[in-house]
Image: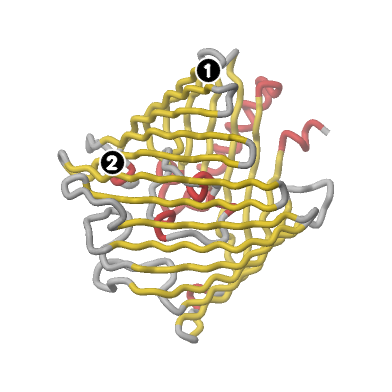
Amino acid sequence: MKKLLSIILMAATVMSVKAVSLEELNLKSRLHYGQEFTEGERMPDLSGFSLDYVFFDLSANLCDGLTFTYNQNLSNLFDYGFWGSLEQLKLNYDINDNWSISAGKMFNLMGGWEMDKEDIDHYAVSEFWNNSEIYTPGIEVDYNFNNETDALCLQVTQSPLLGYYTWGRDLMGYNLMWYGEHDWFQTAYSFNVYGYDKAKYENLITLGNRFDFEDFVLELDITSRADMEDYSLFKSFSIVADAKYNFEYLTLGLKYSFDYNDNVNDMYIMPGTSIHYATAQAEYKPFKNYQDLRLYAAVTTSFGKYDVENSGVIYEPKTIRAMVGLNWNVDFLNMFNK
């Protein structure tokens, strides 16, 4: 509780010193009621009410071109401590209209639109997403070109394969990302190399494709993972397809993911895994003047197989999970500016 109060006090201090410099000050949360069944048997430990996400986000302009960003996952604060639940704490400097540089703990640039979304906006995820460490300390250089419709981003970070509790091990991660926005087609492509032991690396190639036709949006991510000691494409891979249709206040969606590993060395998906998740979901925004409140419902089913001796999966085969809930964001800046 003391840590939480200190975070709130720090935010209040920043606001009192120079409120006009703040760009973002949000508290986001999600509450749901769910029921989960595996092979027809109700799973009581995984059913009932859950306040599954609470995020605190703050960003501010410190001076011309210099921006500070701080994001904390408060729902993990007591389980993982302050540093384990810290998502971003970084400085970004815009050198000019094309170049910028960042340093600190930051979002690890792994391609694909599923990775790009905020955690709180996911009602179902792939195994690959669930096993990925998204935030790592490092540095990043960005280059915007083609009238800012394209961006190349180069990151050098601590390897995300280390996890939260292995600070000090000098294993590195290297990310090259291309974001492109060309009318109805957008890209989130990446080439990633991550150390998992001395002189041992895993390579990921992700093609994140987004097709945006106004009310209808389709996101298609294709990822190949390989140990660079025994390189082979698509022996371990993930496919995620997420389709949504937007009405004025209602969004309907279907999502499908397939995670596969043909018994090769992969730090993300265990050998012997061939698991499918299919989800139907809906979001409803009941207030015209408060779009940050969403009511949602989602039903996920799973099928396939995995090696029980190697590792578990989010949903075992023949599992059905249904949930309804509230997803909301308190934008303090808008409140104080009114």
Q: Is residue 239 above or below residue 110?
A: below
Contact (Cβ within 8 Å) of mark 2 with mark 1: no
The answer to whether residue 250 is left or right of residue 136 is right
Q: Which quadrant holds residue 199?
A: top left
Say if residue 93 shows up in the picture: yes
- Mark 2 is surrounded, within 10 Å at the Cα level, by few (under 14), some (14 to 19) or many (20 or more) other residues, namely many
Of marks 2 and 1, the one in the foreground: 1
Q: Secondary structure at mark 2?
A: strand
Q: Position of residue 148 (x, y in %)?
A: 58, 24
Q: Residue at x 83, y 34 (%)?
A: 338
Which residue is located at x 55 percent, y 37 percent? 6
Circle number at residue 194: 2
Badge 1 marks a residue whose secondary structure is: loop
Q: Given the image, on which type of amino acid does mark 2 rest? A: Tyr
- Of 286 and 307, nearer the camera is 307
Count neighbours of disc 1 (C-alpha within 10 A) and say few if under 14, some if 14 to 19, many if 20 or more. Answer: some
Q: Which numbered disc covers residue 98?
A: 1
- x, y (%) of residue 313? 38, 67
Q: Residue at x 26, y 54 (%)?
A: 266
Which mark identifies residue 174? none
**Residue 323 appears left or right of 317:** right
Name the N-terminal-most of marks 2 and 1. Answer: 1
